[in-house]
Image (tube, helix red, strand yellow):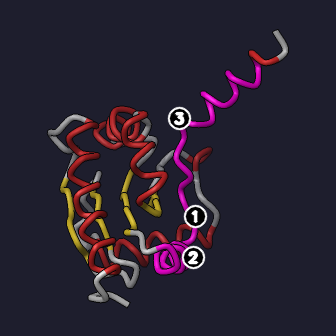
Amino acid sequence: MKKLPVIALCIISMSFINWQPNFETAKKIARENHKLILLNFSGSDWCGPCMRMRKEIFESDIFFKMADTSLVMVDADFPRNKKNQLDAQTMKQNDALADKYNPDGKFPYTLLLSPDGKTVKSWDGLPEESAEEFSDEVKQYCKINRLNYQNGFLK
């Protein structure tokens, strides 16, 4: 009986991805660990497709397992409700990310970036694929990235 709460806590904690709040830190972690960065532009409290993407893809077990070992995740969120407003530093960072990577203001808009911030792949809107198909596609880019590091093509 005493182990049940611990098991339940482990299951609950596995279903949430650790989103890196600072883009520069994400780039550093990606460089050190030879990972790609997944940058997601979302309107967490007003954009229906963004909410669906989070629930159906990012919170799926299959995506979590892949992302946990292969990606550094960054959420550039643009909430509208006053109660969900971000701190000034995060808003400034997200605005700068939008200026650079999402000047047309698309939501959701998702990019795979190299550790130095170059775009590898982008998805405009909610992907039509299932969470499994989306995860497999991202995983293929991550494998290519790892092979490039192993073969000395990337430093």
Q: Which residue is mark 1?
A: 21
Q: Residue 20 vs residue 126: left or right? A: right
In the depicted view, which residue is nearer to us: 115 or 81? 115
Q: For the point 39% across and 40% down, which residue is it?
A: 54
Q: Which residue is mark 3?
A: 15
Q: Looking at the image, is mark 1 or mark 3 nearer the viewer? A: 3
Q: Looking at the image, is mark 1 or mark 2 nearer the viewer? A: 2
Q: For the point 34% across and 79% down, which residue is it?
A: 150
Relative height, residue 37 to residue 82 (above, below): below
User: x%, y% of residue 33?
Assistant: 50, 73
Relative height, residue 66 to residue 152 (above, below): above
Amino acid bearing label 3: Ser
Relative height, residue 55 to residue 39 (above, below): above
Residue placed furthest toward the top: 1
In the depicted view, which residue is nearer to us: 120 or 49? 120
Residue placed furthest toward the front: 151
The quadrant of the picture occupied by the C terminus is bottom left
Q: For the point 66% across and 31% down, which residue is it?
A: 10
Q: Which residue is mark 2?
A: 25
Q: Secondary structure at mark 2?
A: helix
The quadrant of the picture occupied by the N terminus is top right
Give whichever of discs 1 and 3 has the lower sequence position: 3
Q: Which mark is residue 120?
A: none
Q: Are marks 1 and 2 in contact (CB under 8 Å)?
A: yes
Amino acid bearing label 2: Thr
Amino acid bearing label 1: Pro
In the depicted view, which residue is nearer to us: 5 or 24? 5
Give how far apart the Cα atoms at labels 1 and 3 are.
18 Å
Q: Are marks 1 and 3 in contact (CB under 8 Å)?
A: no
- Secondary structure mostly seen in the magenta stretch: helix
Please give the count of numbered marks on the rendered protein. 3
